[in-house]
């Protein structure tokens, strides 16, 4: 495995797909080599981070608290989802190849596998976003949309599909992919809860606006390349401790935040007030969890009274995932959904990303991203979303933001 070539390919397919597809279509390779050198590596990202989220960080259930998947079930789910995702890519390539002549394309299974394997890059990378509270669905959608775009642009290059028929070809292929994903989801749920997916742009000649999402993405690719070199050096040294540290740095690069030591539990716990929204604190807990050098810290508290009113507070340090929070903020992710049952919104307020949900039954949640690293969420029963918003602003968010660079080992 050539890590440098892998990084170049990821960078090329994300930043300059049209040119990269030309190179990909002409490459001489085999099915085993395509899997070994690219697919099996990137396909591991969603499975690994689903395990980290499910078994190490845990899930929040409104009104019921949080839970984690047992380590045994988590590992089993990770391995099964990973294996099935590799099969899914192969089967989808078979389907796309079988449909080729129907859309004016030429049958060639290897080229079809290239189209699917490289188009999935968007979803593979987005799979790391599963550990980010409430942004995970938006990141997953962004990754899926970009993968669809990659497939549409790739089919004319790899299988010779007429450009005017590429949209229809892609649409039929995506329907097949969705059905395959449904089957995979059913199989994984039988084991555990759902915890789930030289070529290139020359940075020496192309410059992005310093604060633009593309500049951050380019910087992300460069950090990934640097981290990969450290992994190779550690593997060559035979030093187990160095290998573990290098892998942690690699995953930190994947998440875009570099190597970050999450805040100690007592630091986050100190941010939790004794009362909130005029309710006394009834429970408090804080912890720090990690795997392969990555860490996430969280403090939780419950506030309530004898009348049964309950409000929950959660403060999370995303650690190495802070890079993805920053990129999500720069990309301007937003959402606005309204129905007769309530609403869900994601927007920016005073430079911070904000998410709010409201159920007309009198329950909601309000969250802000602080310092592109911390998420602070207040949820529970209230007269309106404004009550929860006011409760969150009782906290000293500026004090929390001042800690955004603490524990950062690699900017």
Image (tube, helix red, strand yellow):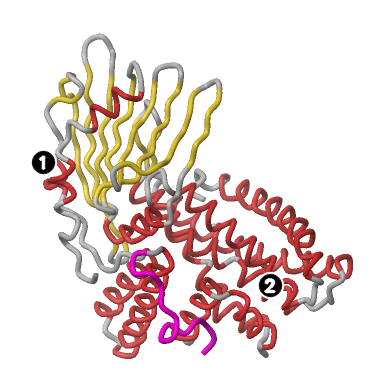
Specify start and end residues of the magenta stretch as a single range: 198-211
Q: Which mark is residue 270?
A: 1
- Residue at 67% over, 66% down: 151
User: Residue 311: x percent and y percent?
Assistant: 27, 24
Percent position (x, y) of residue 345?
44, 36
At x 75% / y 74%, what residue is drawn? 156
Query: 351 left or right of 125?
Result: left
Residue 232 coordinates in the image, percent (x, y): 36, 86
Q: Quadrant of residue 406?
A: bottom left
x, y percentage for residue 169?
A: 78, 62
Q: CA distance from mark 2 to mark 1?
A: 52 Å
Q: Is residue 372 magenta?
A: no
Lateral position of residue 87 relative to residue 68, left or right: right
Q: Choose the circle earlier in sequence order: 2 or 1.
A: 2
Q: Residue at x 14, y 25 (%)?
A: 275
Which residue bears the numbered disc 2?
154
Disc 1 crowd, CA 10 A, few/some/many (<14, 14-19, 20+): few
């Amino acid at each position: 495995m050539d890590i440098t070539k892998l990084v170049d390919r990821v960078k090329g397919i994300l930043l300059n797909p049209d040119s990269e597809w030309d190179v990909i279509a002409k490459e001489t390779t085999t099915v085993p080599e395509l899997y070994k050198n690219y697919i099996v590596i990137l396909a591991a990202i969603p499975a690994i981070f689903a395990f980290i989220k499910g078994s190490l960080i845990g899930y929040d259930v409104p009104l019921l608290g949080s839970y984690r998947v047992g380590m045994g079930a988590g590992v089993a789910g990770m391995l099964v989802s990973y294996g099935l995702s590799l099969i899914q890519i192969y089967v989808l390539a078979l389907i796309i190849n079988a449909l080729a002549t129907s859309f004016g394309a030429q049958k060639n299974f290897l080229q079809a596998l290239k189209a699917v394997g490289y188009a999935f890059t968007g979803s593979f990378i987005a799979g790391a976003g599963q550990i980010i509270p409430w942004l995970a669905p938006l990141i997953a959608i962004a990754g899926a949309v970009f993968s669809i775009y990659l497939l549409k642009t790739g089919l004319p290059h790899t299988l010779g599909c007429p450009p005017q028929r590429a949209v229809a070809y892609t649409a039929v292929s995506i329907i097949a992919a969705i059905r395959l994903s449904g089957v995979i989801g059913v199989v994984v749920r039988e084991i555990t809860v759902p915890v789930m997916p030289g070529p290139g742009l020359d940075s020496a000649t192309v410059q992005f606006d310093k604060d633009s999402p593309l500049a951050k993405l380019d910087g992300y690719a460069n950090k990934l390349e640097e981290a990969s070199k450290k992994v190779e050096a550690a593997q060559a040294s035979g030093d187990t401790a160095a290998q573990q540290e290098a892998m942690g740095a690699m995953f930190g690069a994947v998440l875009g935040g570099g190597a970050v030591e999450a805040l100690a539990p007592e630091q986050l716990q100190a941010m939790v007030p004794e009362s909130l929204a005029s309710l006394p604190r009834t429970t408090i807990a804080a912890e720090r969890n990690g795997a392969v050098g990555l860490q996430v810290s969280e403090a939780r508290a419950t506030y309530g009274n004898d009348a049964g009113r309950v409000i929950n507070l959660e403060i999370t340090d995303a650690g190495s995932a802070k890079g993805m929070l920053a990129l999500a903020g720069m990309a301007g992710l937003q959402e606005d959904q309204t129905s007769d049952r309530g609403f869900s919104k994601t927007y920016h307020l005073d430079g911070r990303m904000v998410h709010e949900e409201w159920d007309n039954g009198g329950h909601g949640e309000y969250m802000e991203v602080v310092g592109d690293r911390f998420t602070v969420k207040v949820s529970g029963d209230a007269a309106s979303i404004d009550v929860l918003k006011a409760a969150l602003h009782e906290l000293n968010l500026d004090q929390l933001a001042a800690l955004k660079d603490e524990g950062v080992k690699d900017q």
